[in-house]
Amino acid sequence: MSNQTISHDTFAARKAMIDSQLRTSGVNEEFVLARMQSVAREEYLPQDKAAIAYIDRSIALDEGHLASPLFYGKLLLEAAPKPSDRVLVVEGGTEYLTDLIRPLVTDLETVSAKDAAEGKLPEGTFTLILVDGAIEALPDAIADVVEENGLIVSGLVLRKVTRLASGRKVAGQVSLSVVEDLGIPVLSAFNRPKSWTFS
């Protein structure tokens, strides 16, 4: 198969993703659709999974995941990044989210989910933090590096259901509020320690 054919096929797949998954779910902002159209999901997958790059579900990898197109579309919509934002991306195992965001801002750092959960974060503070997955709890270390009035957008696990959530830092505190229920891969590095229970 020629590169031209491959390029045409993937372009068509991305257009179908936008028309059938994003637009039908209320994601219509041009900057979001342009980024989702521009970044080829298959390039972030091993060759044996490239054919399923545009399905409407997340794709599990040996280390991490590629979340569903709708998660990334909704996350970008909620985050509404500005060129002036200093952004931290907590990676979910690929650099897909980082590459979606990169052209929209001038200052971008990344950190693995494991390092972020352990408080091993880049220096400085951030106006926008994006988490590529769902977490059970937001570590204090991450809340500490959000600037006042800065925004966090993340998946959140509440009562075993994953939801898209966001929150601003106000008076030094960050509280995540649910945006909507959404299928999101769980970042196990952020799981709360299991406590003993007695029956």
Image (tube, helix red, strand yellow):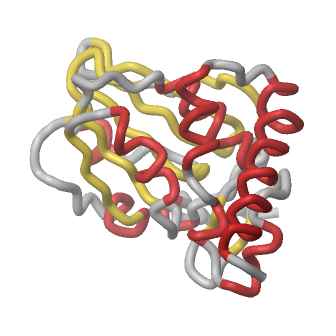
Q: Is residue 49 above or below residue 152?
A: below
Q: Position of residue 193 (x, y in %)?
A: 53, 64
Left or right of residue 177: residue 173? left
The foreground one among 105 and 118 is 105
Q: Position of residue 19 (x, y in %)?
A: 84, 33
Left or right of residue 149: residue 71? right
Please state the total of marks drawn on the protein image. 0
The residue at the point 82 percent across, 68 percent down is: 52
Residue 26, located in which quarter of the rendered image?
Answer: top right
The residue at the point 57 percent across, 66 percent down is: 188
Left or right of residue 32: residue 131? left
The foreground one among 118 and 79 is 79
The foreground one among 65 and 5 is 5
Residue 177, located in which quarter of the rendered image?
Answer: top right
Q: Position of residue 48 (x, y in %)?
A: 75, 86
The residue at the point 52 percent across, 62 percent down is: 92
Q: Quadrant of the C terminus?
A: bottom right
Q: Quadrant of the N terminus?
A: bottom right
The residue at the point 80 percent across, 51 percent down is: 12
Q: Residue furthest left?
A: 124
Q: Position of residue 113 (x, y in %)?
A: 43, 63
